[in-house]
């Protein structure tokens, strides 16, 4: 696999109404601080709760509870025309794109996120370099989510989160992308 990628900052990914921008505990605190908000107010104003049930066949084997950035039908709550309103403190998943998960997931992004102008432009990455980027982001993901991992992937054990604004998803374990 060889990948060419350079973000043009076109903002199209931020305008997608579908998909979830999942936040780590570090993202939540960093964004709240940057907006001079306390964490509870930040969560109430800008986040929703995502419950993901992971199933094997018809049997649930695990569930995760995450906080995600709210969206409207024009995209992320923080997109302003083409610009990210929290550029300096944007979540790790936004900073790491498209080097997320594993090589197969990067390939899937190239196929499915064909609105992204960044693919096919700029710097070339060999498969080895893609692996290095993935590994760097994996370390950052594990560091930023350490508290969540300790708390059994349940963000409700870390922050005071209302369950009234909750979205539910079911994912088959063979579709799960692990960092
Ligand atoms: S936080 Fe910024 S970069 Fe991430 S989806 Fe929202 S507008 Fe885009
Ligand atoms: S769609 Fe692609 S090129 Fe455009 S801002 Fe998002 S990552 Fe960058």
Image (cartoon, rainbow, N blue to C red):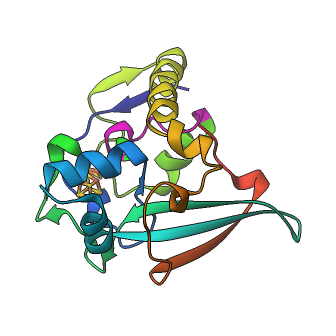
The quadrant of the picture occupied by the C terminus is: top right
Residue sitting at x 60%, y 42%: 149
Image coordinates for residue 177, horizontal then vertical, percent:
64, 46
Q: Is residue 32 above or below residue 144?
A: below
> What stretch of residues is rendered in magenta?
94-103
Image coordinates for residue 126, horizontal then vertical, percent:
48, 18
Residue sitting at x 15%, y 49%: 34
Image coordinates for residue 44, horizontal then vertical, percent:
31, 73
Q: Is residue 16 above or below residue 121?
A: below
- Residue toward you, 165 or 7: 165
Image coordinates for residue 93, horizontal then vertical, percent:
40, 45
Relative horizontal placement of residue 88, taking residue 152 as reference (left or right): left
The quadrant of the picture occupied by the N terminus is: top right
Relative horizontal placement of residue 27, taking residue 174 as reference (left or right): left
User: Does the magenta segment cover residue 152?
Assistant: no
Relative horizontal placement of residue 171, taking residue 51 as reference (left or right): right
């Amino acid at each position: 696999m060889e990948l060419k990628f350079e973000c043009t900052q076109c903002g199209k990914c931020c305008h997608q109404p579908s998909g979830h921008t999942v936040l780590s505990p570090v993202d939540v605190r960093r964004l709240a601080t940057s907006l001079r908000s306390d964490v509870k107010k930040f969560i109430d104003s800008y986040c929703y709760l995502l419950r993901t049930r992971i199933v094997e066949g018809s049997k649930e084997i695990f569930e995760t509870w995450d906080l995600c950035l709210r969206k409207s039908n024009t995209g992320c709550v923080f997109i302003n025309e083409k610009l990210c309103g929290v550029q300096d403190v944007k979540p790790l998943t936004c900073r790491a794109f498209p080097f997320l998960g594993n090589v197969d997931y990067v390939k899937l992004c190239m196929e499915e996120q064909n609105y992204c102008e960044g693919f096919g432009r700029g710097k070339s990455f060999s498969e080895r370099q893609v692996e290095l980027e993935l590994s760097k982001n994996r370390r950052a993901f594990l560091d930023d989510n350490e508290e969540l991992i300790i708390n059994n992937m349940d963000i409700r054990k870390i922050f005071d989160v209302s369950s009234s604004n909750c979205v539910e998803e079911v994912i088959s374990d063979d579709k799960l992308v692990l960092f």
